[in-house]
Image (cartoon, rainbow, N blue to C red):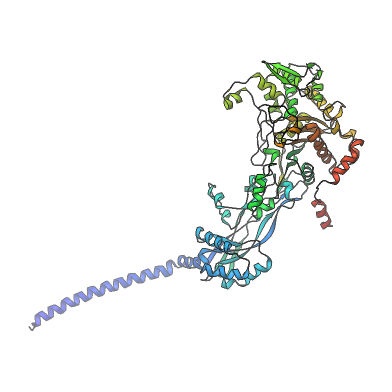
């Protein structure tokens, strides 16, 4: 059917309007698109340029150098050694199996280690590095670096690892570091990004862990450009990290080594304290272990051997070991009785070998008794009956109060983990902890350092230093941080009558210098260096049996505390030998050697000992496992 001219014209007009509408819409769309393109290309050009940069520029954290630890003479106790390692990142790696196969031809990479790397990559985030191998030789490290183009995602790194040049000597005090584990990270409330650096080392024990914040430093950054295969093309920017603080401890490395050597073969602890400053000159614990084994990753067999050793080499006995102080506590009881006004120094108590209280017999160590003894005589002979009487007169509250004045029952805030505060019990303590009333028998046991009373070797040294000086000696372990001397705490005069202290000091003097004293064989022959001390033997079982007739772990602990010189005290020493038997026979000879070493600054001269003992002493020192002096080696190298 043919359209009329009118219909054709109408249809043409309709098509033209549609075309114009469609064309206008297209033109509008093209305009908007052009505006959008201009906005993206001009206005957002910098943003998209940064996004593009982000695809080819990577930012890496640089581990800082861990702060160094020194002794008071500047000898390194913990230092950093260079180490070579290679790491891999999931986001940069292609064909992980192929990369590991290539590496197997370049370095020693067992199948078990390859599986460890795969497992690490599965668990790690895209940018988190996983260590493939550490402590590589220079040759192996160079081979990996030279084949870098064929190893996408693999980065050779030069790092630092901790080393303890004096090994076992400071294992318990300086401690050790280990690579941060996932378990360690999970326990942190806030994780510092520095700990995500591969194999970054964190303090695990000792000063290394308590002073972690000062030692770890702050991470630096590295910006690198890499290609699509993950191969680093160039380094764009580097900001080195801030090293951790260098810390000088109060220890004297020579004294510490002598302490460890003299205690060798025993399960024992000893502390040497500078009475004037409170500086801890040495804090020994034996047996010890090599902290470098833990840094490298100790084997299961070696770790099991440490755990199964009955002498317990892992704990620091000098600050973590809590022992009944035995008769070394008698100075506390004596001062408590004097201060309470219930006894005069020259008043005597008759010892017949025992005391009966409440139908129970409390024995003196000398079954035949000591006869009439005053305060000085009670310390000289270590008469138990005298102190049973003082306990009944003064009471536990006065005894506990005096013990706290002398530093017992506290840990002093030293930067050592797991420090025991011991136990200075009283009536309230027993009621709260044991749900029972305090009885007179508890007081009698406490008066001679048995029962509930517990002390650490560190506390015994502090107690002795306070008695010797009459001042509030507070132990100090950190001498300086980055060269800034740390404050010496305490030093105030004790609230104890000086005449009472003199009476107790006289008794301690006679312990070692009177021919009838319990430690006379451990006297110092040099009249200018005479030592005052007190023996102690603490029971670990209720029944009194000869130590030779029972297994080692059931024998009494041997203790000795001392200070010297008597007329001008410089050092306080405490020694505890676990299951060592008698304090006079086992602990006192050790304490004398330690005291003389501290006073002389070297192996003591033989003329400091009684002439009859010099042959034995000479042989003892000849066989001591002493370390060569690193301070002397340093001086030689400087020369």
- Residue 250 found in image quarter: top right
Image spot of residue 360 (x, y percent): 68, 18
Residue 491 seen anywhere in this rendered image of the structure: no
The residue lying at 69 percent from left, 38 percent from top is 319
Quarter of the image with the N terminus is: bottom left
Q: From what the image shows, is residue 570 above or below residue 405?
A: below
The residue lying at 68 percent from left, 65 percent from top is 137
- Residue 468 found in image quarter: top right
**9, 145: nearer the viewer:** 145
**67, 13: nearer the viewer:** 67
Q: Residue furthest front?
A: 549
**64, 558: nearer the viewer:** 558
Residue 113 seen anywhere in this rendered image of the structure: yes
Q: Residue furthest bottom?
A: 2
Image spot of residue 533 (x, y percent): 80, 30
Left or right of 381? Residue 288 is left
- Residue 566 found in image quarter: top right
Image spot of residue 584 (x, y percent): 80, 31
Left or right of 613? Residue 302 is left
Quarter of the image with the C terminus is: bottom right
Q: From what the image shows, is residue 594 above or below residue 520?
A: below
Left or right of 297? Residue 598 is right
């Amino acid at each position: 059917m043919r359209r009329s001219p009118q219909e054709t014209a109408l249809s043409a007009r309709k098509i033209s309007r549609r075309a114009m509408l469609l064309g206008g819409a297209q033109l509008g769309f093209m305009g908007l698109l052009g505006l959008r393109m201009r906005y993206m290309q001009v206005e957002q050009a910098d943003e998209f340029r940064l996004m593009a940069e982000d695809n080819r520029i990577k930012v890496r954290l640089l581990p800082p150098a861990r702060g160094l630890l020194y002794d008071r003479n500047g000898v390194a106790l913990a230092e950093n050694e260079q180490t070579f390692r290679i790491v891999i990142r999931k986001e940069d790696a292609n064909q992980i199996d192929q990369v590991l196969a290539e590496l197997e031809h370049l370095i020693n990479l067992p199948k078990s280690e390859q599986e460890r790397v795969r497992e690490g990559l599965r668990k790690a985030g895209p940018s988190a590095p996983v260590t493939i191998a550490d402590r590589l030789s220079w040759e192996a490290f160079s081979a990996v670096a030279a084949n870098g183009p064929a190893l996408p995602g693999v980065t050779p790194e030069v790092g630092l690892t901790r080393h303890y040049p004096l090994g076992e000597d400071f294992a318990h005090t300086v401690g050790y570091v280990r690579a941060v584990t996932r378990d360690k990270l999970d326990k942190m409330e806030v994780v510092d990004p520095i700990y995500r650096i591969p194999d970054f080392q964190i303090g695990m024990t000792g000063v290394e862990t308590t002073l972690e914040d000062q030692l770890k430093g702050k991470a630096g950054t590295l910006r690198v450009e890499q290609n699509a295969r993950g191969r680093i093309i160039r380094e764009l920017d580097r900001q080195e990290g801030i090293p951790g603080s260098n810390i000088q401890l109060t220890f004297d490395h020579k004294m510490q080594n002598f302490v460890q050597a003299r205690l060798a073969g025993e399960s024992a602890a000893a502390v040497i304290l500078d009475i004037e400053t409170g500086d801890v000159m040495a804090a020994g614990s034996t047996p010890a272990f090599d902290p470098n084994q833990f840094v490298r990753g100790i084997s299961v067999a070696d770790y099991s051997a440490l755990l199964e050793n009955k002498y317990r080499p892992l704990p620091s006995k000098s600050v973590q070991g809590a022992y009944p102080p035995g008769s070394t506590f008698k100075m506390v009881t004596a001062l408590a009785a004097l201060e309470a006004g219930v006894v005069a120094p020259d008043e005597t108590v008759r010892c017949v070998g025992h005391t009966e209280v409440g139908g129970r017999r409390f024995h003196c160590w000398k079954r035949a008794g000591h006869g009439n003894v005053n305060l000085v005589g009670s310390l000289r002979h270590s008469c138990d009956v005298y102190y049973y009487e003082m306990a009944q007169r003064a009471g536990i509250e006065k005894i506990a109060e005096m013990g706290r004045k002398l530093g017992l029952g506290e840990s002093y805030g030293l930067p050592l983990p797991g420090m025991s505060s011991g136990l200075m019990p009283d009536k309230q303590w027993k009621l709260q902890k044991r749900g029972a009333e305090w009885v007179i028998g508890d007081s009698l046991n406490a008066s001679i350092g048995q029962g509930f009373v517990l002390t650490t070797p560190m506390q015994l040294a502090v107690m002795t230093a306070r008695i010797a000086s009459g001042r509030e000696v507070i132990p100090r372990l950190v001498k300086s941080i980055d060269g800034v001397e740390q404050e010496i705490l305490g030093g105030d005069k004790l609230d104890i009558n000086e005449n009472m202290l003199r009476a107790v000091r006289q008794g301690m003097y006679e312990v070692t210098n009177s021919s009838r004293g319990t430690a006379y064989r451990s006297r110092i022959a040099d009249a200018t260096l005479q030592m005052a001390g007190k023996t102690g033997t603490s029971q670990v079982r209720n029944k009194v049996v000869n130590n030779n007739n029972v297994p080692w772990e059931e024998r009494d602990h041997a203790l000795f505390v001392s200070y010297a010189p008597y007329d001008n005290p410089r050092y306080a020493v405490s020694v505890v030998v676990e299951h060592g038997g008698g304090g006079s026979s086992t602990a006192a000879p050790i304490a004398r050697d330690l005291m003389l070493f501290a006073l002389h600054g070297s192996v003591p001269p033989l003329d400091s000992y009684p002439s009859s003992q010099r042959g034995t002493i000479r042989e003892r020192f000849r066989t001591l496992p002493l370390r060569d002096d690193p301070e002397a080696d340093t001086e030689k190298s400087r020369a």
